[in-house]
Image (cartoon, coloured by chain):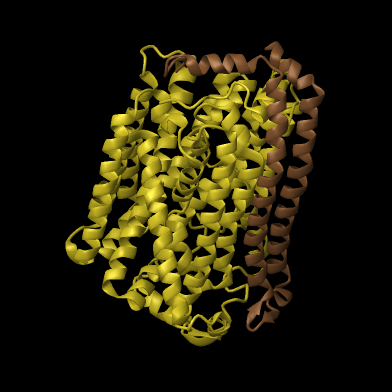
């Protein structure tokens, strides 16, 4: 395990180097919040990939496919589809018409203070859910990987928290971007090698490989079964499985395009054309990554078997364990370090989007009505917000402990993004009749519906069998039958936004629509790159 | 409202730009999202059909999953090609405004101005 530590320390050292370099170059708000808007298309493509592909897409996804076969592969497809929405609907107009946050686009047409306040609230909600999920994941991972080294869960969580604060507080968006680029490249390199090692076992005959995945033998509730892992239905089955899948697909289709830490990346490039090209780069990286994870997950099912995976520290370790079996301890060390780097880069990205929204939307524009009382105030506030949010996330992650369900938190964040942020962002860019009341209704309904339905759904409510390790917070029959709430909350977000608009009239917002549309489509008046 | 933006918003060229963009984006996005929903419906409601093997043991469901990636990349490629035209139309619109002058002035202005 010392090799793992060495690889990891090398990564940390190089990212601290990046941070030092970025800190020296960062002067002014647009440098801090948007990396001076000078990131190139390929760089932003890798950075978006590094921002998006979290521990859930690496450790979680491979484990899910290894245990549930095709039903896990569904998540790989889902992770990719949202980027088509981003490419066609969001990236370019967002870059053209905003400065640092989604709140900028809303404030352009509507009464700025209420819409910014709500946009900041939903951004901070999503960021907190995401960040806690990643930090719990990081803590559990390190505790497992470095089991012999005396580094425990709490130490790992604090370590991640401190590193992330250093990146964000000192290096801003420029350091965050480069940490994400390096991480994305390392993750891709590891995945390519691991995929090749899996296929080599079948002498690169793909049909032989898939033939092996069609007869996976393992114990299910004590009974020896043989299953075809490409068959859907191992996890999602009647009565609600089908609806749950549809619900999840809605969240995937629109959620990514509402994630604040993804949206901010499009302000780091010089213009809309670069933003567009960077999404295509991201789609190439993320898509090929997900296709490879299907091979890795199925490969883990074939080469290790679900029994072995469950016996060796659970589904999240299927990927690292596959690396150990196929590539030895050194490769395991490298893969583990990369998994940890993955978490670090995502947490830094989420953190900077949260502190940007707090400083720019809430502090400067809501509290102080758009006036900086001292030059550079927004950056100072963002740095302090980063410290506060980071410390809070560390405390919550330590309090929750390694056993908490990471997937629920992360999916919840995505669901809020799909139900609150995306409807309001899309309508303000494309619907003339949209009003302040509509935006407020949409954000509020999307946020409350998602949180409320999760609270009364089967992830929180349920009756645990006697003697089982209790994992439901509320011991009662769930009022809402689905794990994934998108099928109700996404339409509700849209409907509330539309109803709120139709019930009010706001000539000023309608008049501003033409101006926004011209800016969004031509880049007239768009923020320029700066040093 | 800024008269320049109002003038552009009312111009035929700008309306043409929006129409050309809409002609690509709406069909492309609807088609892609509908195939994704189709994929989900197939997997969720027609598991027999989804499990039908087509190439060796590889079934409809897995091939459909791969198809989503190929479709996404294809749409991205087509969009890049189509956007050449969007960019050309945009350039024509901007060339007729006094924007060119104002933007040039902005570039000459000292760095960090307007922050």
Give the number of marks.
0
Return the x and y of residue A356 as percentages of the image width and height: 43, 30
Residue A87 visible (yes or no): yes
Relative height, residue A466 to residue A521 (above, below): below
Q: Quadrant of residue A511?
A: top right
User: Which residue shows up at 79% across the image and 42% down it?
Assistant: B23
Q: Would you say A507 lies left or right of A322 here?
A: right
The residue nearer to you, when weighing A359 against B7, is B7
User: Which residue shows up at 46% across the image and 53% down it?
Assistant: A53
Please state, as top left, top right, bottom left or bottom right, where the N terminus of chain A lies in the image: bottom left
Return the x and y of residue A391 as percentages of the image width and height: 30, 38
Q: Which chain is brown?
A: B
The residue nearer to you, when weighing B69 against A431, is B69
- Residue reaching furthest to the left: A150
Q: Which chain is yellow?
A: A
Please state, as top left, top right, bottom left or bottom right, where the C terminus of chain A lies in the image: top left
Return the x and y of residue A325 as percentages of the image width and height: 34, 78
Relative height, residue A26 to residue A51 (above, below): above
Q: Would you say A85 lies left or right of A26 here?
A: right
Q: Quadrant of residue A497?
A: top right
- Residue reaching furthest to the right: B12
Residue A132 visible (yes or no): no
Return the x and y of residue A481 as percentages of the image width and height: 62, 58
The residue nearer to you, when weighing A334 against A380, is A334
């Amino acid at each position: 395990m010392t090799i793992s530590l060495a690889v990891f320390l090398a990564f940390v050292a190089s990212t601290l180097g990046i941070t030092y370099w970025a800190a020296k170059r960062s002067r002014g708000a647009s440098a801090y919040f948007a990396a001076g808007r000078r990131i190139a298309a390929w760089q932003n493509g890798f950075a978006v990939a590094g921002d998006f592909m979290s521990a859930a897409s690496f450790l979680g996804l491979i484990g899910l496919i290894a245990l549930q076969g095709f039903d896990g592969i569904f998540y790989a497809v889902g992770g990719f589809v949202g980027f088509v929405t981003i490419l066609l609907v969001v990236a370019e107009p967002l870059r053209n018409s905003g400065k640092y946050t989604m709140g900028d686009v809303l404030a352009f047409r509507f009464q700025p203070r209420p819409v910014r306040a709500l946009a900041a609230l939903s951004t901070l909600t999503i960021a907190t859910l995401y960040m806690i999920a990643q930090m719990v994941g990081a803590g559990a991972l390190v505790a497992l990987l470095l089991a012999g080294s005396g580094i425990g869960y709490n130490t790992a969580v604090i370590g991640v928290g401190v590193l992330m604060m250093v990146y964000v507080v000192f290096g801003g968006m420029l350091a965050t971007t480069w940490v994400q680029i390096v991480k994305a490249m390392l993750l891709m390199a590891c995945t390519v090698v691991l995929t090749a090692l899996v296929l080599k076992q079948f002498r690169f005959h793909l049909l032989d490989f898939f033939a092996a995945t069609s007869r996976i033998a393992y114990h299910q509730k004590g009974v020896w079964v043989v299953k075809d892992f490409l068959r859907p239905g191992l996890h999602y089955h009647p009565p609600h499985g089908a609806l749950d899948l549809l619900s999840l697909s809605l969240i995937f289709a629109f959620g990514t395009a509402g994630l604040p830490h993804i949206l901010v990346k499009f302000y780091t490039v010089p213009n809309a054309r670069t933003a567009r090209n960077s999404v295509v780069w991201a789609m190439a990286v993320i898509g090929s990554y997900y296709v490879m994870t299907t091979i890795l997950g199925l490969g883990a099912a074939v080469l290790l078997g679900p029994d072995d995976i469950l016996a060796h520290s659970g589904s999240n370790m299927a990927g690292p364990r596959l690396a150990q079996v196929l590539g030895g301890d050194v490769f395991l060390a490298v893969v583990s370090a990369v998994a940890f780097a993955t978490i670090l880069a995502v947490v830094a990205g989420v953190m900077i989007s949260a502190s940007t929204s707090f400083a720019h939307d809430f502090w400067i524009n809501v509290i102080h009505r758009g006036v900086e009382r001292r030059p550079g105030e927004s950056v100072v506030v963002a740095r302090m917000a980063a410290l506060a949010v980071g410390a809070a996330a560390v405390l919550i992650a330590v309090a929750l402990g390694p056993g908490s369900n990471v997937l629920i938190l992360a999916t919840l964040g995505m669901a809020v993004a799909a139900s609150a942020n995306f409807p309001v962002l899309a309508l303000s860019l494309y619907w003339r009749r949209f009003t302040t009341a509509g935006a407020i209704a949409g954000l509020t309904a999307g946020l409350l519906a998602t949180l409320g339905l999760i609270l009364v759904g089967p992830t929180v409510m349920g009756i645990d069998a006697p003697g089982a390790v209790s994992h439901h917070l509320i011991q009662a029959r769930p009022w809402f039958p689905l794990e994934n709430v998108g099928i109700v909350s996404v339409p509700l977000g849209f409907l509330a936004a539309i109803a709120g608009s139709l019930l009010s009239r706001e000539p000023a917002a309608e008049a501003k629509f033409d101006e926004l549309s011209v800016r969004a489509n031509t880049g007239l008046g768009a923020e320029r790159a700066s040093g | 409202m800024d008269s320049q933006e109002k003038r552009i918003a009312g111009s035929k060229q700008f309306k043409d730009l929006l129409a050309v963009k809409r002609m690509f984006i709406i069909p492309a996005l609807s088609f892609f999202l509908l195939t994704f929903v189709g994929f989900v419906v197939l997997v969720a409601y027609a598991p027999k059909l989804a499990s039908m093997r087509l190439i060796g043991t590889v079934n409809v469901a897995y091939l459909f999953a791969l198809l989503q990636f190929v479709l996404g990349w294809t749409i991205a490629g087509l969009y890049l090609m189509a956007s050449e035209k969007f960019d050309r139309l945009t350039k024509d619109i901007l060339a007729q405004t006094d924007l060119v002058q104002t933007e040039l002035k902005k570039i000459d202005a000292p760095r960090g101005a307007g922050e």
